[in-house]
Image (cartoon, helix red, strand yellow):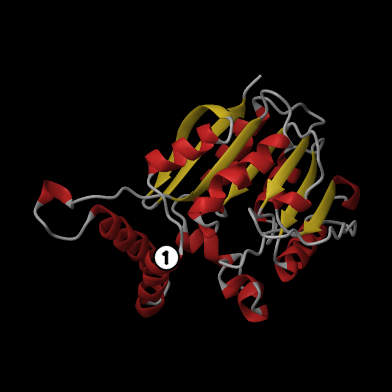
Amino acid sequence: MGRHAPVRPSRQHHRHTTRHMTHPHTPSAFTDPAAVARYAEGPRRNVPGYDGLLRMSRILLAERVPAHGRVLVVGAGGGLELEDMALAHPGWRFDGVDPSQPMLDLAAQRLQSAGVSGDRVALYHGYVQTAPAGPFDGATCLLTLHFVPREERVPTLVEIRRRLKPGAPLVVAHLSVADGAGPGGDGGAGERDLWLSRYAAFQVASGVALEHAARARDKVAAELAVLTPEEDEAVLREAGFGDVRMFYMGFAFRGWVARVGS
């Protein structure tokens, strides 16, 4: 993504195609074979209301994507959102891009197992610049943008916008937490620390070992480009999207729908 040179497109037309863009800042979990094999467990343990997030995302897309529309999926590795949309909307076609080839392979396997025809989905190994020019009727970028460095957010979103038709929707969801003093301004843990602690607590309540959840929280705090909700909305507008509306909040995660200006 962003300023990094895109990988040459590798269009895979097996009976399904692949997910998650592997960015230099993307965790090794998206390249480690054992971690990739366990990927499907992760979102539901880490993201409050994950299945509802998928359903809401496709409902928002369907408000504007026609019955035989074409959808761009940025960060398509793993294939969870591709499978969800493909089964719910049998007339839609998809182009997915992801920097992790193992995650794309996993997506292809998932789609094949779900019975999704290979001629409906094309997967590309690389960043958003690797994706076809479109124009697309809509796009998603779920649980991906927090891996993109702050200075690359706007250029990345511009690349998505350039591939969309006027008025087309973009649905994004990722880590996004407030900054500032803690509740009551008492000098205790800041708001960001509070929400990241709740993020870890949700993982523990979902069956993740305490030490693993604590390590994940610390890595998020130290390594990921987690913006505030206000900053996230600002970068969407700066990239040329309008009608920016928050539709989802799950502890440290937020989701927005926006549209390309006419």
Q: Is residue 4 above or below residue 28?
A: above
Position of residue 190 measured from the top left corner of the image (x, y, whole percent): 22, 56
Please report the residue visible at 79 percent of the width from the left and 64 percent of the height from the top. 109
Residue 82 is at least partly visible in this image:
yes
Position of residue 200 measured from the top left corner of the image (x, y, whole percent): 36, 65
Residue pointed to by mark 1:
220
Please report the residue visible at 83 percent of the width from the left and 60 percent of the height from the top. 8
Position of residue 40 measured from the top left corner of the image (x, y, whole percent): 61, 64
- Between 187 and 71, the one nearer to me in the picture: 187
Residue 206 is at least partly visible in this image:
no
Q: Label 1 neighbourhood size at 10 Å, few (<14), some (14-19), many (20+)? A: some
Q: Quadrant of the N terminus?
A: bottom right
- Between 203 and 124, the one nearer to me in the picture: 124
Q: Amino acid at mark 1?
A: Val
Q: How many marks?
A: 1
| The image quarter in which residue 35 lies | bottom right
Q: Quadrant of the C terminus?
A: top right
- Between 115 and 260, the one nearer to me in the picture: 260
Q: Residue furthest top?
A: 262
Position of residue 39 measured from the top left corner of the image (x, y, whole percent): 61, 68
- Element type at mark 1: helix
Q: Residue furthest left?
A: 186
| The image quarter in which residue 133 lies | top right
Please report the residue visible at 55 percent of the width from the left and 70 percent of the height from the top. 27
Side (left or right) of 176 relative to 163? left
Q: Is residue 105 above or below residue 238?
A: below
